[in-house]
Amino acid sequence: MDRQGYSGLQVVTVSNIPGREIEENLGIVFGSSVRSRSFLFDIFASFRNLFGGEVRSYTKLLETAQEEAAERMAEQARTMGANAVVDVHFSTSHVAAKAAEIFAYGTAVRVK
C-alpha cells in the first residue's frame, strides 16, 4: 500500500520510502472505526450464505471502515507535524454483537 490521498501525507506499509530519507521519527499513530451491521444487512447476508458467494454489503462496510480508520490515523500524524506514515498495519476485532472495529496504526515520520 502506498497512498498519497491523505491530504498529501504519504502512507506506506513498508518501513521506508524509496528515494526519501526519514529525518525524524515522531511516534506511533493510530485510528479506528467501529461499525455495526443493520438488521437488513443480516437478512441479505443470510440469503447469500444459502447460495454462496461474496456478501458485498459487508465488503463495502469493511472497506468504508478501513478508509475511515486510515484517515483518522493520517490526521493524527498531520497534527504531530508528520509528512508520512510508515509501517502501516490494519487489524480487526469483534467489539460487540454485530459490531466490528477496524484499527489502523503506523509510525509518523518526517521525511526529506
Image (cartoon, helix red, strand yellow):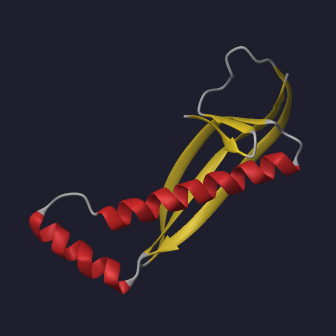
Number of numbered discs overlaid on the protein picture = 0
Q: Quadrant of the N terminus?
A: top right
Residue at 67%, 54% (x, y): give it: 71
Q: Residue 101, how many percent across, how many down?
A: 53, 64
Q: Residue furthest bottom?
A: 39
Q: Which percent across, then down, holds residue 61?
A: 44, 65
On screen, residue 79 above or below 83 = below
The residue depicted at 63 percent of the width and 51 percent of the height is 70
Where 8 falls versus 70 (above or below)?
above
Residue depicted at x 80% and y 17%: 21
Residue 14, position as x, y percentages in the image: 61, 27
* 81 lies left or right of 16: right
Q: In the rendered view of the protein, which quadrant contains the C terminus?
A: top right
Q: Is residue 32 above or below residue 5?
A: below
**In the image as oriented, which residue stretches furthest toward the left?**
51
* Residue under the image location 35 percent in, 67 percent down: 57
Q: Is residue 77 above or below residue 47?
A: above
